[in-house]
Amino acid sequence: MVNCSAARCTVIDRFVVLGAAGDLATRHLLPALAHLVAERMLPSTLRIVGVGREPLDGPAYRALATTRLAEHAAQIDPADRALLVQRLDYLRADLEEHPDLRSALGSGPVIAYLALPPSVYTSAVHVLRAGGVAPGSRIVVEKPFGEDVESARALSQLLHTVVDERDVFRVDHFLYHQTIQDLLALRFANSLFEPVWNREHIDRVEITWEETVGVTGRAGYYDCTGALRDMVQSHLLQVAALVAMELPAALDERCLRDEKVAVLRRVRALAPAEVASQTARGRYTAGSVQGQARRGYAQESGVDPSRETETYACLGLAVDTARWRGVPFELRTGKAVGQPRRRIKLHFRATPGSALTGRPAALCLDMSPNRVTLELQMSGPSGLPGTAAELLEVSRPRQQMPASARLLRDVLAGDPTLTVRDDEAEQCWRIIDPVLATWRTGSPALQDYAAGSAGPGHPEGWQPSNAP
Ligand code: NDP
């Protein structure tokens, strides 16, 4: 979303990718830059410098980039890919050894993109500070942003010694999913749903992101992170905030994020006894996913089973606002399930007619990246099958600019509306920290679920409540 009033005219000199030979940089960032070249949206004076500890130089990095772009940006005209490649340079540096980055940073404003393991963020920011980034520079930080409230706050404070908060872009790719942006239009721009979007009409809200993939070679990161930190702390709480917030005065960086923070503040942190009864955690065992044999998470290479890292997390939250008091929000995410489910589902309250026609209806918004469906689900009168009325189905053409390119476009324009502000990140950790603390005591127990199943059930006595 480029918000013209928010866009700023600082001329960015260089785009510096820290961790330039890694997976994110070569599989997502380079293709995103190639899209911007193809759309003629990358300023012609912008230099791109990769920094990393791999033993490469300029020509070797350009060769690596050419190969990766052929793999991951094949749809872009080869001439445009070549235009990008010829702008690339590389500096070999280990950011934990206090290297001098002045030659990479130059003297004008830069965008520094931290495509690094989170354990290196602090060193990287210290190195940027020592390198003396010019005023007007921006820093992009990937999730996870910290590992609890304290570390998130400390990292923000460190970043603020280099750039202003407005120039920090904490990335949550979910905010760039078209569906998430459609959600705002669905809620606020039509009179069909706005009047019923509240506790009077809605009984409970489910936000689900379940996928068939396992850890797919990212065990080193995932095993230290788990489903709760990886998915719930960032993505699902962002979605929940967009579902639950009040109408922002404007869809700009300040008003939109103010409303998200306001509602996140009203999400009640769970007490230990509530964590036992209102959360679930699971880990997949060997099974078969869509006909393919899958080994258990504990047998994946790079996993330390004694960590008891969860690959499935579910929690019931209370949103203590006038609009939602009494309506439980259930957030659920898991890997290696049999059928992917990515949806926001609002269950309507029973009406007098429900006694005749069966279960009350639900409104279901599918969050798949290239497809939007909005479905009204109704159950039939006792014993009879229900109906699902598709209200809307839109398939998006695959060649549409990917989310990562739209993010870079906004970073170049200086518009952080669809990124996470420091207070938002802290609020999300405030909600997650007590769950992690109770899970560390073994409560509730980690449940096994077979790969290819629907995931673990709720723990015994599951009763997500939303009492104030
Ligand atoms: P990778 O491990 O593939 O890449 C990280 C890169 O940083 C590697 O090239 C690595 O070099 C380099 N690096 C590590 N330590 C240093 C150091 N001290 N000095 C200089 N370079 C260093 O990780 P990803 O690309 O997968 O992830 C990067 C970030 O992006 C993480 O925060 C991750 O959570 C986030 N992310 C990644 C996604 C993805 O799809 N990959 C999706 C969403 C977020 P070396 O190879 O030598 O270790």
Image (cartoon, helix red, strand yellow):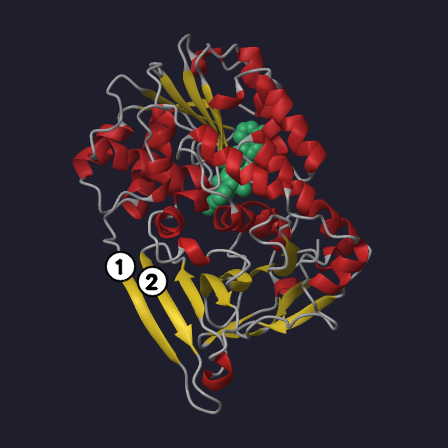
Q: Which residue is found at the position 41% from the left and 82% from the top?
A: 386
Q: Which residue is found at the position 80% from the left and 55% from the top?
A: 272
| Label 1, residues with CA under 10 Å away: few <14, some 14-19, many ≥20 | few
Residue 145 visible in image: no
Residue flagged by tag 1: what amino acid is it?
Val
Q: In this rendering, is residue 135 above or below 398? A: above
Residue flagged by tag 2: what amino acid is it?
Thr
Q: Nearer the viewer, residue 26 or 142?
A: 142
Position of residue 437 measured from the top left corner of the image (x, y, whole percent) = 77, 49
Q: Nearer the viewer, residue 194 or 111?
A: 194
Position of residue 62 measured from the top left corner of the image (x, y, whole percent) = 33, 30
Given the current orientation, which residue lies at the most extreme front position? 352
21 left or right, relative to 302 = left
Q: Secondary structure at mark 2?
A: strand
Q: Secondary structure at mark 1?
A: strand
Residue 466 visible in image: yes
Q: Nearer the viewer, residue 200 or 462?
A: 200
The part of the image, by quadrant, that contains residue 8 is: top left
Position of residue 349 measured from the top left corner of the image (x, y, whole percent) = 52, 69
Q: Which residue is found at the position 45% from the left and 16% from the top?
A: 137
Residue occupied by mark 2:
373
| Label 2, residues with CA under 10 Å away: few <14, some 14-19, many ≥20 | some
Label 1 to label 2: alpha-carbon separation:
6 Å
Position of residue 128 measured from the top left corner of the image (x, y, whole percent) = 54, 17
The part of the image, by quadrant, that contains residue 65 is: top left
The part of the image, by quadrant, that contains residue 143 is: top right
Mark 1 touching mark 2, by CB under 8 A? yes
Of labels 1 and 2, earlier in sequence is 2
Q: In this rendering, is residue 224 above or below 326? A: above
Residue occupied by mark 1:
394
